[in-house]
């Protein structure tokens, strides 16, 4: 049953433009059974030492990270299951001097990244709130920021049509992928790590091979700015959202358009696939969040709980929850059955 679990008003003092889930699981909990734990006793001791050194918690943790135009990154702890849950403030991360426009969390649930209109990317220890690294991306703004699936790299698009890739450890610039186009607004890694895709302000989509750095596809996707781009969990499909009010799905290997989806009354600002590969979520300037059935290509539920444009909506790692953030300064968590 689709339902609103919690709504936090005035979560930031200005509009909230980005959000991301983080899920941390201690190494020991990942072991299949007690026999494995016994066999890997020494390894477990090493993991305990590593947790102590890196200030990692002993128990499983779920986080939500939000970035706002008040220049702040906020970390929230999410507790609860089923149709109940609580959002608790954990850290307020200060350092950016202009609005935070994109946030992401690595797959391990240990590090958050934020990009800002101040032309910097900052890396944060998700558990302690400590700032780990500042990367100067000037003189142009760093827009969308995303972690690679392995978590060792972060990528960001900019106004010059380039995707800059940096090492998480040390912030070193690794490579630049050139779209030869205009302002790269949105980017995404495929979950198998093979591709990076970008969406531009002029509606073009570029897909790069990560290993070679070569441009694989250029697609004339939309007539207007592509606000969000995401790969399906199996990395076979690419989903885009744009100011023309449409979402488009492409087959990565053939670059063919699989379908065009409509239903929002205004700009589509974000899209995100559920890990179950059965659903995806979209958010829009029309103040709504919509859940879509992947196989049927239709909307199965519309949330109407924001009262301004919804800049971002993201699925939790187990696909059972959705978080959305809005210009109305609120953070909402929904139950989304799978």
Image: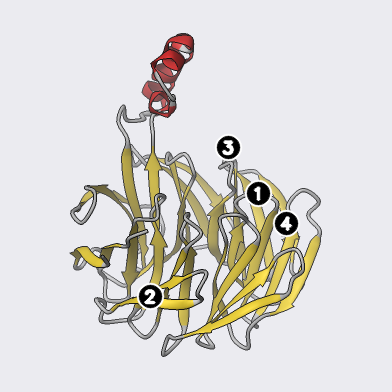
C-alpha span from label 1 to label 2: 30 Å
Q: Earlier in the sequence, mark 4 or mark 2?
A: 4
Secondary structure of the residue carrying numbered label 1: loop
- Which residue position holds label 4? 176
Check disc 1: other Cα within 10 Å, few if <14, some if 14-19, many if 20+: some
- Packing grade of label 3 (10 A; few <14, some 14-19, many >=20) is few
Q: CA distance from mark 4 to mark 2?
A: 40 Å
Q: Secondary structure at mark 2?
A: strand
Percent across and percent down for residue 160 are 68, 71
Question: Mark 2 packing: few (<14 Cα in 10 Å), some, or many (20+)?
Answer: few
Q: Which mark is residue 193?
A: 1
**3 vs 2, front mark:** 2
Q: What residue is rendered at 76% in x and 73% in y?
A: 218
Q: Position of residue 102 (x, y in %)?
A: 46, 62
Q: Earlier in the sequence, mark 1 or mark 2?
A: 1
* Measured Cα–Cα span from mark 3 to mark 2: 42 Å
Which residue is found at the position 69% from the left and 65% from the top? 162
| Labelled disc at residue 87 | none
For mark 2, what is the residue?
A: 300
Tell me whether the residue at label 3 lies in contact with that at label 4, contact meaning CB atoms closer than 8 angstroms.
Answer: no
- Does residue 322 appear to the left or right of 77 in the view shown? right
Q: How far apart in space, not on screen, are marks 3 and 4 (Cα)?
A: 17 Å
Going from N to C along the chain, the mark reached first, 1 or 3, is: 3
């Amino acid at each position: 049953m689709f339902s609103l679990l919690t709504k936090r008003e005035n979560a930031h003092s200005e509009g909230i433009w980005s959000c991301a889930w983080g899920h941390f699981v201690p190494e020991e909990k990942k072991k299949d059974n007690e026999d494995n734990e016994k066999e890997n006793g020494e390894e477990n001791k090493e993991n305990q030492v590593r947790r102590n050194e890196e200030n990692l918690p002993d128990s499983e943790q779920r986080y939500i990270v939000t970035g706002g135009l008040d220049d702040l990154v906020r970390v929230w702890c999410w507790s609860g299951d089923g149709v109940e849950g609580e959002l608790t403030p954990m850290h307020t991360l200060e350092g950016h001097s202009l609005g935070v426009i994109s946030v992401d969390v690595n797959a391990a649930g240990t590090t958050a990244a934020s990009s800002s209109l101040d032309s910097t990317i900052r890396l944060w220890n998700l558990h302690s709130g400590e700032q780990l690294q500042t990367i100067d991306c000037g003189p142009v703004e760093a827009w969308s920021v995303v972690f690679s699936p392995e978590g060792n790299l972060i990528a960001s698009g900019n106004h010059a049509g380039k995707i800059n890739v940096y090492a998480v450890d040390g912030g070193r610039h690794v490579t630049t992928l050139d779209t030869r186009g205009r302002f790269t607004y949105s980017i995404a890694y495929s979950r198998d790590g093979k591709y990076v895709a970008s969406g531009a302000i002029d509606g073009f989509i570029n897909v790069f091979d990560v290993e070679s750095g070569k441009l694989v596809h250029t697609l004339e996707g939309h007539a207007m700015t592509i606000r969000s781009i995401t790969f399906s969990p199996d990395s076979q499909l690419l989903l885009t959202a744009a100011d023309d009010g449409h979402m488009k799905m492409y087959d990565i290997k053939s670059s063919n358009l699989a379908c065009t989806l409509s239903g929002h009354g205004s700009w589509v600002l974000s899209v995100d696939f559920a890990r179950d590969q059965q659903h995806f979520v979209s958010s829009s300037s029309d103040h709504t969040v919509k859940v879509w059935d992947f196989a049927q290509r239709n909307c199965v539920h519309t949330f109407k709980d924001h009262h301004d444009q919804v800049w971002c909506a993201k699925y939790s790692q187990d696909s059972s929850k959705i978080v959305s953030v809005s210009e109305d300064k609120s953070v909402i968590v929904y139950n989304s059955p799978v």
